[in-house]
Amino acid sequence: MPSGFELLIVLVLVLILFGAGRLPQVFEAFGQGLRKFREAQQDDPVEPDAGRQLSASASDASAKVVEADEVPKVREAAEG
């Protein structure tokens, strides 16, 4: 975690690079991007399904959902 002195140095460098006039615009754009990122994370939660795996056959481009105990059978069928 950065200390207060390190944050002060970063703030001064940002002020020098962007200038006092553009600083509110820069932080506003950063805040909007961060807000959109958080909303996207909340909109699409990924819940793993413990008993299932995805398997794609060489002859079929679409993925199939198979039970974990069926994986060896699918693997044998795909190999030939």
Image (tube, rainbow, N blue to C red):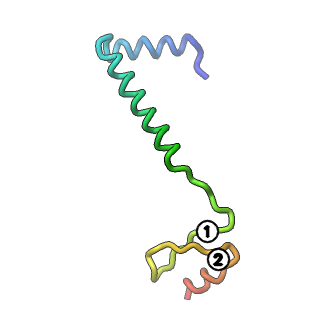
Residue 13 is left or right of residue 64, and the answer is left
Instruction: Give the quadrant of the C terminus.
Output: bottom right
Residue 60 is left or right of residue 46, and the answer is left
- 35 to 55, vertically: above or below: above
Q: Could you tell me residue 4's position as x and y percent?
A: 57, 12
Q: Which residue is mark 2?
A: 71
Q: Earlier in the sequence, mark 1 or mark 2?
A: 1
- The disc labelled 1 sits on which kind of residue? Gln
Number of other residues with Cα within 10 Å of mark 1, as a class: few under 14, some 14 to 19, many 20 or more = some
Q: Secondary structure at mark 1?
A: strand
> Residue furthest toward the left?
21
Q: Could you tell me residue 20's position as x and y percent?
A: 32, 10
When asked about the image quadrant of residue 25, the answer is: top left
Q: Which residue is mark 1?
A: 53
Instruction: Give the quadrant of the N terminus.
Output: top right
> Residue furthest toward the right?
69
Q: Secondary structure at mark 2?
A: helix
Residue situated in front as seen by the camera: 64 or 13: 64
Q: Could you tell me residue 70's position as x and y percent?
A: 66, 79
Residue situated in front as seen by the camera: 80 or 35: 35
User: Looking at the image, do the residues carrying marks 1 and 2 touch, with CB atoms under 8 Å apart?
Assistant: yes
- 50 to 32, vertically: above or below: below
Q: Residue at x 60, y 81 (%)?
A: 74
Number of other residues with Cα within 10 Å of mark 2, as a class: few under 14, some 14 to 19, many 20 or more = some
- 79 to 21, vertically: above or below: below
- The disc labelled 2 sits on which kind of residue? Val
Q: Residue at x 64, y 83 (%)?
A: 73
- 64 to 2, vertically: above or below: below
Q: Residue at x 47, y 40 (%)?
A: 39
Q: Residue 30, which numbered label?
A: none
